[in-house]
Amino acid sequence: MDAPPCCYEDIDSASTIFITGSNTAFAHPVLYRRLEDASKHNPDLKVIVVDPSKTNAAK
C-alpha cells in the first residue's frame, strides 16, 4: 500500500526501514523529511529502497 505510516513515532525507534516501489521523496515529502531527520539522529539506521526506477528516495 502506498501510504505514509499511521504512527510517525515508529520512525524514531526503527533500526531498519524498508521502502518498496515508492518515490517517497516526491509522493510523501513529510515522511521523507522525517526519514532524513531520523537518519541524522541515528547513523545506524538502515533505509532499504527497492524500486526499479531511479528516484530521489533511492539515492
Image: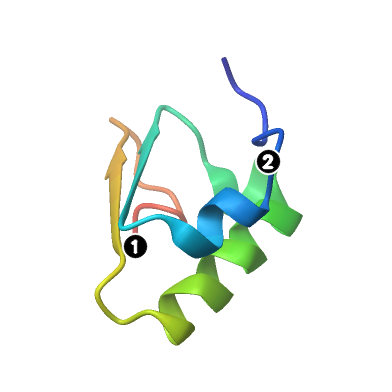
Q: Residue at x 38, y 79 (%)?
A: 42
Amino acid type shown at disc 1: Lys
Residue occupying the point 52% across, 41% down: 23
8 in relation to 59, above or below: above
Q: How is the image coloured?
A: rainbow
Compared to 51, does 7 lie above or below? below
Q: Quadrant of the C terminus?
A: bottom left
The image shows residue 35 at horizontal and vertical percentages of 53, 63
Residue receiving disc 2: 27
Residue in front for this viewpoint, 27 or 38: 38
- Residue 20 x/y as whole percent: 37, 30
- In this rendering, the answer to whether 6 lies above or below 34 is above
Residue 46's quadrant in the figure? Answer: bottom left
| Percent x, y of residue 29 | 71, 55
Query: Residue at point 64% right, 35% down?
Result: 5
Q: Mark 1, residues whose alpha carbon is within 10 Å: few (<14), some, or many (≥20)?
A: few
Which residue was labeled with disc 1? 59
Q: CA distance from mark 2 to mark 1?
A: 15 Å
N-term-proximal mark, 2 vs 1: 2
Secondary structure of residue under mark 2: helix
Identify residue type, mark 2.
Ala
Residue at point 57%, 15% (across, down) = 1
- Asked which secondary structure carries label 1, the reply is loop
On screen, residue 49 versus residue 24, left or right, reads left
Direction top: furthest residue: 1
Q: Position of residue 50 (x, y in %)?
A: 27, 35
